[in-house]
Amino acid sequence: MLNRESLAQMQKALAESNVDGWLIFDFHGLNPVAAVLGLEGMGTRRIFAFIPKTGLPVAITHAIEQGPWKEWPSEWTKLVYSGWRELEKNLKDVVNGKTVAMEYSPGDAVPYLDRVPAGVLEMVRNSGATVVSSADLVSRFYAVWTDEQLASHKRAAETIARIARAAFDKAGEAASAGKPLSEYKLQQWIVGEFSASGLTTDHGPIVAIGPNAANPHFEPSPKNSALIERGMIVLIDLWAREENGIYADQTWMGSLGEPSKRDLEVWLAIRDARDAAIALLRERLGNGNGVKGGEVDDATRAVIVERGYGDRFIHRTGHSIDARDLHGSGPHIDNLETREERSLIPGVGFSIEPGIYIAGEVGMRTEVNGFVAPDGVIITPESYQQDLIIV
């Protein structure tokens, strides 16, 4: 929430930049980053809030929606408009001649940053401003976790790791008894375990036997669900959080019986790729050196390419997990789908999840989460998967 204390922190960051201020725009919730303003109540009209490098913030608000601004300090300027001419005049008065940071990614390099419509950018530029990306500000003031949120994430991570291991045992026991579970039935058992453990999720999880797992976003359903039988590779991708907490997001791999030579080879490739990412993070962050999300993706991908499966690793290595969203707006572990050049700064979290997908045959993915601490990186869960689970 933007208040006098957070303003001081933002202005300290702005003082280290080459911009005159941060211009935050929103309309009907188009820009989730506008949540840093802490507005509550109905918001159906265009708003701007300018946070200058020095001096006091300025808000541009609509006349019929003053309620959300009730906590805006009285000494901060609040301009009120009704018509578009007044809006554009107010905007020009605020930004003319200034360089402003907005939620804009040149060339849509990082879609999670590209939140401001092209027409609004035109309006701001026509008001005499130069627009640059707010990428680093978003990482620092939107994506970071608090200590309490980190603690909630750690608790969720250990719980879902326990549930994942138990799910493989359950599938193996059912198959050995001649009563194999369907992917959907095991998924619903996991959902029940989430509820019993005080965790919630938005949808999922994914439970998929080998060929179905070759679709990274396979979703079992009552009408689209295979039986989990002996001899099968099984992928379980599960994510959940405590109420108002931070998501934990993991993928575990198992085999009902001894895996084939090829399946074991695929498992070792993704495991070693994941561990290459962790090693780079520990080395660079542990030594106080910076590392970018794209660099971690490159290190991960290099292992899979070297093993001969480069064309089967068809997605980024990992996504941001921010304080509000499972797929967040902070730096991603990606140099494939997007050009992620942001540094992984203290306080941000993300997934690490390399995968190999051979259509019609098998898909495998291993996933852990990372959090940048002041002195290094924290990986969750504490005991993450090293060997293919065989039940």
Image: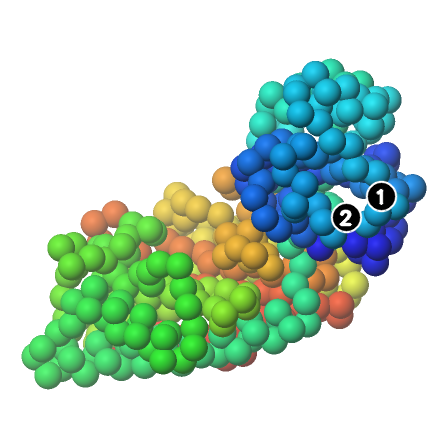
Mark 1 crowdedness (10 Å alpha carbons): few <14, some 14-19, many ≥20: few
Q: List x then y, in percent, for residue 42.
A: 56, 44
Q: Can residue 203 be seen here?
A: yes
User: Left or right of 81: which side holds 15?
Assistant: right
Query: In this rendering, is residue 324 above or below 314?
Result: below
Badges 2 and 1: C-beta atoms under 8 Å apart? Answer: yes
Query: Could you tell me which quadrant the C terminus lies in?
Result: bottom left
Q: Quadrant of the N terminus?
A: bottom right
Q: Does 116 sit above or below residue 238?
A: above
Q: Secondary structure at mark 2?
A: loop
Which residue ends up furthest to the right in the rendered image?
55
Q: Nearer the viewer, residue 307 or 282?
A: 282
Residue that carries the numbered disc 1 in the rendered image:
76
- 149 or 219, which is in the foreground? 149
Q: Position of residue 100 (x, y in %)?
A: 78, 32
Q: Residue at x 79, y 37 (%)?
A: 78
Residue at point 75% right, 70% down?
A: 375
Mark seen at residue 72: 2
Tell me if residue 113 comes above or below residue 372 in the rendering.
above
Quadrant of res 271: bottom left
Q: Which residue is drawn at the image coordinates 25% and 61% (left, top)?
A: 208
Q: x and y percent of residue 351 in the render?
A: 52, 59
Q: Is residue 239 left or right of residue 391?
A: right
